[in-house]
Image (cartoon, grey):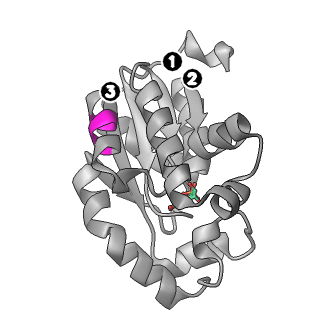
């Protein structure tokens, strides 16, 4: 982690937002190769801090508790610079989170078709909000409920269907002028 911090070419934090399965974590890694920036993987940090999985946090403490952890973390991140932040899919749903992101960086929205999302999440069991909803119709509905907030939070929107992570990382790099 420290290895990257000193060499980052990013002028400000880059927040990758978007629905579950839009490729935020994978694209963060590809962007890291281009920018040498440190990655902050929000879900991973929250799970580490809590000493349990995201599914466990949801099951035992409920969603509101998890959301307050996200807000605390995004506020802490706001004080740093030059990092790639791979956000949990629900982060832009809270206005205070969006304010924090826009204060300290560029917000990049990644999108994908519901069928692409389904392909990417079908075998994953650590996304509690998708349990029992792993079908195109339910995914489309949940995406639609969130669409406006995602769009309002974003400085730049990038579609990810049928593109490699490297292509997308290059697009982001061009969009943020580094
Ligand atoms: C969530 C997305 C997940 C994780 C949690 C809730 C959401 O992150 O934060 O399960 O509300 O969209 P990913 O988008 O990285 O899967």
Cβ(mark 2) to ligand 1 < 8 Å?
no
SS of the residue under disc 2: loop
Total number of numbered discs in the rendering: 3
Q: Earlier in the sequence, mark 3 or mark 1?
A: 1
Residue pictured at 64% horizontal, 37% vertical? 45
Of callouts 1 and 2, which one flags the residue occurring earlier in the amino acid sequence? 1
Residue that carries the numbered disc 3 in the rendered image: 104
In percent of width and height, residue 119 lies at: 63, 76
Q: Residues within 10 Å of mark 1 (few under 14, many from 20)?
A: some
Give the mark toward the camera: 3 or 1: 3
Residue at 45 percent across and 57 percent down: it is 90
For image coordinates 49% across by 86% down, the residue present is 138
- On the image, which quarter does residue 146 sit in? bottom left
Mark 3, other Cα within 10 Å: few <14 / some 14–19 / many ≥20? some
Q: Indicate which disc residue 36 carries.
A: 2
Seen at 68% across and 64% down, the residue is: 59
Residue 176 visible: no
For residue 83: magenta?
no
- Disc 2 to disc 3, C-alpha distance: 18 Å
Spatial separation of the CA atoms under disc 1 and disc 2: 5 Å
Quadrant of the rendered image holding ligand 1: bottom right
Q: Secondary structure at mark 3?
A: loop
Residue 111 screen position, x and y as percent: 41, 63
Q: State the image quarter where residue 18 is shown.
A: bottom left
Provide residue 50's location: percent of width, then percent of height: 70, 40
Q: Is residue 100 left or right of residue 25?
A: left
Magenta part, dominant SS:
helix
Magenta-colored span:
98-102
Q: Is residue 11 visible?
A: yes
Residue toward you, 113 or 68? 68
Report the disc number at residue 8. Answer: 1
């Amino acid at each position: 982690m420290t290895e990257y911090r000193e060499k980052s070419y990013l002028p400000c934090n880059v927040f990758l937002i978007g629905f579950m399965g839009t490729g935020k974590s994978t694209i963060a890694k590809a962007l890291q190769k281009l920018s040498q920036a440190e990655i902050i993987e929000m879900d991973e940090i929250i799970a580490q801090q809590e000493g349990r999985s995201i599914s466990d946090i949801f099951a035992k403490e409920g969603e509101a508790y998890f959301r307050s952890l996200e807000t605390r973390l995004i506020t802490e991140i706001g004080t740093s610079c030059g990092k790639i932040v791979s956000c949990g899919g629900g982060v832009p749903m809270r206005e205070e989170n969006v304010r924090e992101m826009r204060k300290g960086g560029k917000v990049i929205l990644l999108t994908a078709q519901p069928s692409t999302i389904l392909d990417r999440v079908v075998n994953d069991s650590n996304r509690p909000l998708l349990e029992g909803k792993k079908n195109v119709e339910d995914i489309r509905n949940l995406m639609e409920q969130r669409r406006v907030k995602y769009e309002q939070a974003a400085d730049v929107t990038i579609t990810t269907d049928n593109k490699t992570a490297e292509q997308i990382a290059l697009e982001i790099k061009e969009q943020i002028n580094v």
